[in-house]
Amino acid sequence: MFSVQRQNERSNQLQQERNPIISMRNVSKRFGSVVALDNLNLDIYESQILAVVGNNGAGKSTLVKALSGAHAIDSGEIIINGHRFNGLTPALADKEGIVTVYQDLSLVDTRDLVSNIFLGREYVLWGFWIERRRMKIDACRVLKQLNIDIPNVEIPVGELSGGQRQSIAIAKAISQGGKILILDEPTAALGVRESKAVLDLVRNLKSQQYTIIIVSHNLKHVVSVADRLCFIHHGRAVEDVDSNLTSEEEISKRLAEIG
């Protein structure tokens, strides 16, 4: 089993090597009598894959929504790229380069890949003419950048596989210009082959200097891609672990221990 001392030594080493791109300091969020985040402290480093793990109700989803601006925090601060915020809005998060791919993907099944990637951000000429050709060129460029192989970009996304749809949702997020990507259960309900393709895409993003935060219950997938794991329990970040120092079995055991 990994030791707390080794975890702290690794965490201190990281802090000495570089400054975090995101810091959450004493962040709290309540929903009535329910404490979702409780003075949470967390550092996220550039070009690193951080996995957030915890049991149901631990506060993982609230953490994601606090970072994406979907939930205003009650207290504490979030520091992004050196800018301090007592609370984020979606517009502020977007401005700081944070993009989120939620589990529902937010795709329109009846529209094609190009339309989905630029949904709400269409290129418009003269105030009314949609520049479809330009959008298609840029959509194909993003797919090539991410090594996503979908030969026909004009079929409805509802006809694509689950893994392809997940890839399109990620491509849509990347096309918005963000460099900090939050993935909420990216391999949920995917088969082995499709999960591998999505995980390969995540590794590719890291190689291109993207910072990635993954929330997932699939511990096997988490260990295979993450650099660090943060354990959340009752709204607090209770442990920070180098993924090279642990395993799927050890993580499962630790989650059982913290309840």
Image (cartoon, rainbow, N blue to C red):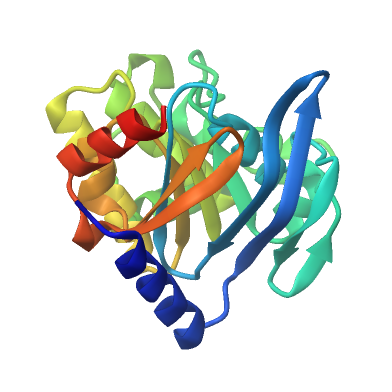
Residue 228 percent coordinates (x, y): 36, 58
**Front-most of residues 77 and 189:** 77
The part of the image, by quadrant, that contains residue 131 is top right
The part of the image, by quadrant, that contains residue 7 is bottom left
Q: Residue at x 82, y 38 (%)?
A: 72
Q: Is residue 118 visible?
A: no
Left or right: 240 with respect to 24?
left
Residue 195 percent coordinates (x, y): 22, 33
Q: Tally the marks.
A: 0
Q: Residue at x 54, y 48 (%)?
A: 237
**Front-most of residues 57 and 167:** 57
Left or right: 192 with respect to 151?
left
Give the vertical position of 47 relative to 29 (above or below): below
Give the vertical position of 219 relative to 123 (above or below): above
The part of the image, by quadrant, that contains residue 133 is top right
**Front-most of residues 71 and 101:** 71
Q: Residue at x 37, y 38 (%)?
A: 167
Q: Is residue 128 visible?
A: yes
Quadrant location, the C terminus: top left
Q: Residue at x 73, y 49 (%)?
A: 27
Residue 238 percent coordinates (x, y): 50, 48
Residue 214 percent coordinates (x, y): 43, 44
